Image (cartoon, helix red, strand yellow):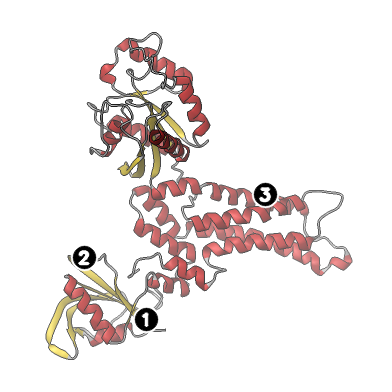
Amino acid sequence: MDTICAISTPPGIGGIAVARISGPEATDIAQRIWKGKNLSTAPSHTAHLGMIQDPHNPGELLDQAVATVFRAPASFTGEDVVELAIHGSIYIQNALVNLLIRQGCRLAEAGEFTRRAFASGKMDLAEAEGVADLIASTSRAAHRVAMSQMRGRFSNKLAVLRDQLTELAALLELELDFSEEDVEFADRSHLLQLAVQTLDTVKRLADSFSTGDAIKRGIPVAIIGRPNAGKSSILNLLLGDNRAIVSDIPGTTRDTIEDIATIQGYAYRFIDTAGLRHTDDTIENLGINRAWGKTAMAKIVLWVLSPDTFDIPGTSAPNDPDASTLSLNELYTKLRETMSPDAHLLTILNKSDLFTLHDFSTLSNRILELTGSPPLKISAIHDTPDELSSAIHRITTATLEDTSDIIVTNSRHYEALHNAISPLTRVIKALQPTPYPIPSDLIAQDVRESIHHLSTITGSITTPDLLSTIFSRFCVGK
């Protein structure tokens, strides 16, 4: 295998940059351009100060650097590795890479260091993908999930599942060896219990993907309500920026506006939407349809109400004879029909500076009666975001955060888990007590199919095309 090199730190100017060299000639190549302690004989996991120079032009030094030596197999890739920490000049970085290539290195492809770690057994495929997720993590929650995957928690759970299925298949196939003697080695009730436990775990892991994907990409929060309820002001409040245009003219927002903000370690994708009402305006209707579409995809829905956009009996809010008005009941019914079953609704009474105490009490009781939860009273113009942010975070920790279980964040893993459900379901049906038992060979075939799908997650079963696709998404240098 050839020796590869690349800059492993982000592109651009910085205090330092790190060039990584991995392969059978890593220390020999590094030594050719090194002026200092002999790296070829340096012990593993040692760092050395020295100078980098072109062996064909020894009088001209490129940079002062620190070389760290890792001997196989005790390195990230499982090969000999040398990392050169240099000053972050773009010129120095490019000159060093060119110098290493002239000495016999090949420029690494995207993800090639991690791919070599997988090939040498330093990590399985799921753990390697955890490395990519860790690099891409933008919030504490995404970082925590990626760390769990990179350290093998998900892989260990899959290993248990595969062991259970392998035991099940072995017992069934043992019967096949003695089929002519009509001997049944496997207790079907025990096998059924084992299959049910396995299927429950696979389903739970697959179901966690919705949560994991939200944590990874930003938890989607749809901000919906009638025109002029203050939805755009709510978005600006949460983002701490004038991201959306705010106007007293109804229908200002005709498309969705999205931006990401982090609240107490979670990334949220806040989505401002068009005001919900009856209208004959074709463009506005497109925006309203998009608003309902974003509502269906959201994990949290912020339903924004204000006293000047609803005529609630018993309050001093103005009458609204506009035929476009959607009543409170109409909106709530449509909301519940549209929202995902696992989504949560937070009702916000905005423009609190316009409320009388009597109005707020009446409106609050009406919302509580309708939704089963009290509303949050704020003024998006005058208040700080603290109270609203805390309410959103409380919903998140109560519904999404589960440190006791594993959360799946990778769509490839979800697909494999989903594909394992059908054969496992057939196994359970086949193991049910019936007058005409299904032959063991047919059941064992479905068990093996389930094992196959689970094995593709960790890379026990894989193809070169799959590996190329996965590792091509990594950055060069990792």
Q: Label 2 belongs to which residue?
A: 12
The location of residue 232, given as percent across then percent down, is 30, 33
Q: Is 415 on the left-hand or right-hand side of 27?
A: right
Which one is in front in this view, the residue at disc 2 or the one at disc 1?
2
Asked whether the viewer can see residue 427, the reply is: yes
The location of residue 255, given as percent across then percent down, is 36, 38
Can you say whether 263 is above or below 182 in the image? above
Question: Could you tell me how far apart the alpha carbons at marks 3 and 2 are, in whole angstroms?
Answer: 53 Å
Q: Is 321 on the left-hand or right-hand side of 85?
A: right
Work out whether residue 86 or residue 417 is closer to the camera in this orientation and state it: 417
Work out whether residue 122 or residue 105 is closer to the camera in this orientation and state it: 105
Question: Could you tell me how far apart the alpha carbons at marks 1 and 3 are, in whole angstroms?
Answer: 46 Å
Task: Identify the secondary structure beneath mark 1.
Answer: loop
Which one is in front in this view, the residue at disc 3 or the one at disc 2?
2
* Quadrant showing the C terminus: bottom left
Q: Label 1 belongs to which residue?
A: 23
